[in-house]
Image: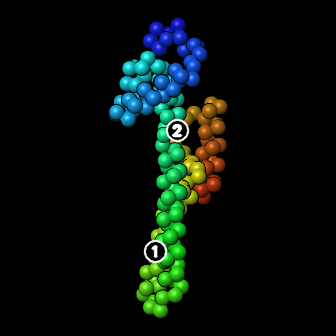
C-alpha cells in the first residue's frame, strides 16, 4: 500500500473518478501545477495527469470544435464576397485587393485546421560522442549516415 497515494490498485468508481476530475480541473484552472494538485488531492502524479487530460478533452475540445465551425462559416462568407468582387470589379486595383483577401482567407483556414503544420521532424545530434566499436555506436553511425544521405549531406536542422 502506498502511504502517500493510498492503494493504487483500488478500483475507483465512476463517481469517484468524476469527483477527482472536477477537483483536479478546478485546481488547474485556479493556477496549481500538476505536482501541487497531486499532493493536495493525494492522487499519484500519473492519475492527476490522466484526470487533467480527461477534463481538458471534455471541456476544451468541444468548444474548440464549435469555434472552428463558427470561424469556418465566417470565412466562407468573406470568401464569397471577396471572390465575387475579384471576378466582377471593373477596377484592376479593386480586383487585386479582393484576390489578396481570398489568399488571406485561405491562409487563415489552413492555419486554423493545422494543414500547414509539419508532419514529422528528424533530429540528429552530430556532436554527441560515441564509440563506433559498440552496438549503439554502429547503429548511431548508420542512422547518421542515412540522415546525411537523405538530406544531401546537410544537417537535418538546415534542410
Q: Position of residue 128 (x, y in %)?
A: 50, 38
Q: Position of residue 72 (x, y in %)?
A: 52, 62
Query: Is 130 positioned to the left or the right of 32 in the image?
Result: right
- Outermost residue on the front side: it is 15
Q: Position of residue 42 (x, y in %)?
A: 43, 17
Residue found farthest to the bottom: 90
Q: Secondary structure at mark 2?
A: helix
- Residue at 50% x, 58% y is 70
Query: Circle 1: is it few (<14), some (14-19), or many (20+) Cα within 10 Å?
Result: some
Counting every numbered tag in the picture gives: 2
Front residue of 17 and 117: 17
Q: Is residue 1 above or below residue 157?
A: above
Whether residue 128 is visible: no
Residue 19 vs residue 145: left or right?
A: left
Say if 106 sits above or below 121 in the image: below
Q: Nearer the viewer, residue 67 or 142?
A: 67
- Model colouring: rainbow
Q: Nearer the viewer, residue 12 or 139?
A: 12
Q: CA distance from mark 2 to mark 1?
A: 35 Å
**Of pointers 2 and 1, the one earlier in the residue sequence:** 2
Crowding around mark 2 (Cα neighbors within 10 Å: few <14, some 14 to 19, many 20+) is few
Q: Secondary structure at mark 1?
A: helix
| Residue 132 higher or lower than 78, as above or below | above
> Residue shown at 57%/19% (left/top)?
13
Residue annotated with mark 2: 58
* Residue under numbered circle 1: 101
Q: Residue at x 52, y 44 (%)?
A: 61
Image quarter (top left, top right, bottom left or bottom right) of the C terminus: bottom right
Question: Which mark is nearer the camera, 2 or 1?
Answer: 2
Q: Nearer the viewer, residue 149 or 91?
A: 91
Q: Position of residue 41 (x, y in %)?
A: 42, 20
Amino acid at each position: 500500500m502506498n502511504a502517500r497515494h493510498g492503494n493504487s490498485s483500488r478500483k475507483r468508481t465512476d463517481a469517484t473518478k468524476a469527483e477527482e476530475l472536477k477537483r483536479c480541473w478546478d485546481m488547474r484552472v485556479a493556477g496549481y501545477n500538476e505536482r501541487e494538485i497531486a499532493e493536495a488531492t493525494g492522487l499519484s502524479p500519473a492519475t492527476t495527469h490522466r484526470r487533467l487530460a480527461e477534463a481538458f478533452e471534455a471541456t476544451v475540445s468541444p468548444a474548440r470544435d464549435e469555434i472552428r465551425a463558427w470561424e469556418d462559416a465566417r470565412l466562407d462568407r468573406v470568401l464569397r464576397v471577396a471572390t465575387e468582387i475579384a471576378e466582377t470589379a471593373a477596377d484592376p486595383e479593386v480586383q487585386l485587393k479582393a484576390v489578396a483577401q481570398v489568399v488571406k482567407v485561405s491562409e487563415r483556414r489552413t492555419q486554423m485546421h493545422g494543414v500547414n503544420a509539419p508532419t514529422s521532424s528528424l533530429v540528429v545530434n552530430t556532436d554527441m560522442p560515441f564509440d563506433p566499436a559498440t552496438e549503439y555506436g554502429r547503429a548511431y553511425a548508420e542512422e547518421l549516415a542515412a540522415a546525411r544521405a537523405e538530406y544531401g549531406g546537410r544537417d537535418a536542422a538546415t534542410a
